[in-house]
Amino acid sequence: MFNVELFTVGPLFTNCYLVYCPESREAVVIDPGFGTTREAEDFLRKILQMKLNLKYIVNTHGHPDHTSGNGFLREKTSAPVLIHRLDASKLGEARRVVYESLGFELYSPPADGFIDEGDIIKFGDSELKVIYTPGHSKGSISLIGEKCIFSGDTLFAGSIGRYDFPDSSFEEIMHSLKEKILTLPGNFIVYPGHGPITTIEEERRNNPFLKEFL
Ligand SMILES: [Zn+2]
Ligand SMILES: [Zn+2]
């Protein structure tokens, strides 16, 4: 069983999650979308204070508000950057200008490894399972843990992710929600990429975008 700490970071108030095994102190960071070097340094200090060993930097997708801190954390901790192959082109030196134009002081180097449907990310006695949930972007994934899901920009409390980017698809995001996410047990906690934490049951009942499935 792992612990979860939420850090809301960057100009778009991204939910960055620090997930760790309390016994082994091994940790994974999900979506470190820091806006400034200072924010990244504060986060790193917290990891060191908590005596955590960062094993992986995981991106639910490649947008700058979820990936800007990749380079900083990789340099300081040597943890590899993991992302789905279909969002990998959103990272790297050539995209630096995009990060700058959106107001991020930091950016992401290329990924070190790719994750896809069914992959297991292990840290200490804990693990996260990757599910492929495209629609917000071509390479969007979600991560399933014990009784919880990290849903990136696919599912939010009362809303769903944007589907108007060039590589977005309304049909795909709806398919991902219906077939991969809403099929989870109602008591699963949803840790979204932005906004408040919710549950599958709460979203089944009250999310206006999901009404057509019921
Ligand atoms: Zn996004
Ligand atoms: Zn986002």
Image (spheres, helix red, strand yellow):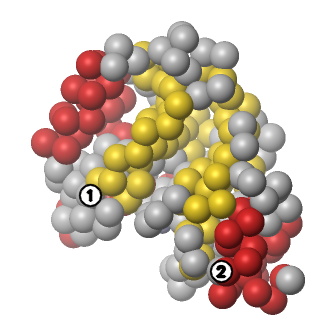
The local crowd at label 1, few if under 14, some if 14 to 19, many if 20 or more residues have their Cα within 10 Å, is many
Query: Does residue 213 sit above or below 181 in this rendering?
Result: below
Query: Does residue 95 sit above or below 79 in this rendering?
Result: below
> Residue 25: image x %, image y %?
48, 15
**Of 88 and 185, which appears nearest the observer?**
185
Identity, as a three-letter code, of the amino acid under mark 1? Gly
For the point 35% across and 47% down, the residue is: 7
Q: In which quarter of the image is residue 129?
A: top right
Numbered badge on residue 10: 1
The single residue placed furthest to the top in the displayed view is 24
**Of 23 and 130, which appears nearest the observer?**
23
**Of 157 and 112, which appears nearest the observer?**
157
The local crowd at label 2, few if under 14, some if 14 to 19, many if 20 or more residues have their Cα within 10 Å, is some
Q: What element carries label 2?
A: loop
Q: Quadrant of residue 136?
A: bottom right
Query: Does residue 170 sit above or below 64 in this rendering?
Result: below
Which quarter of the image is occupied by the C terminus? bottom right
Identity, as a three-letter code, of the amino acid under mark 2? Asn
For the point 67% across and 85% down, the residue is: 209
Q: Is mark 1 on a helix, strand or loop?
A: loop
Q: Determine if the C-beta at disc 2 is less than 8 A from ligand 2.
A: no
First in residue order: circle 2 vs circle 1: 1
Numbered disc in front, either 2 or 1: 2
Numbered badge on residue 207: 2
CA distance separating discs 2 and 1:
26 Å
For the point 65% across and 60% down, the residue is: 199
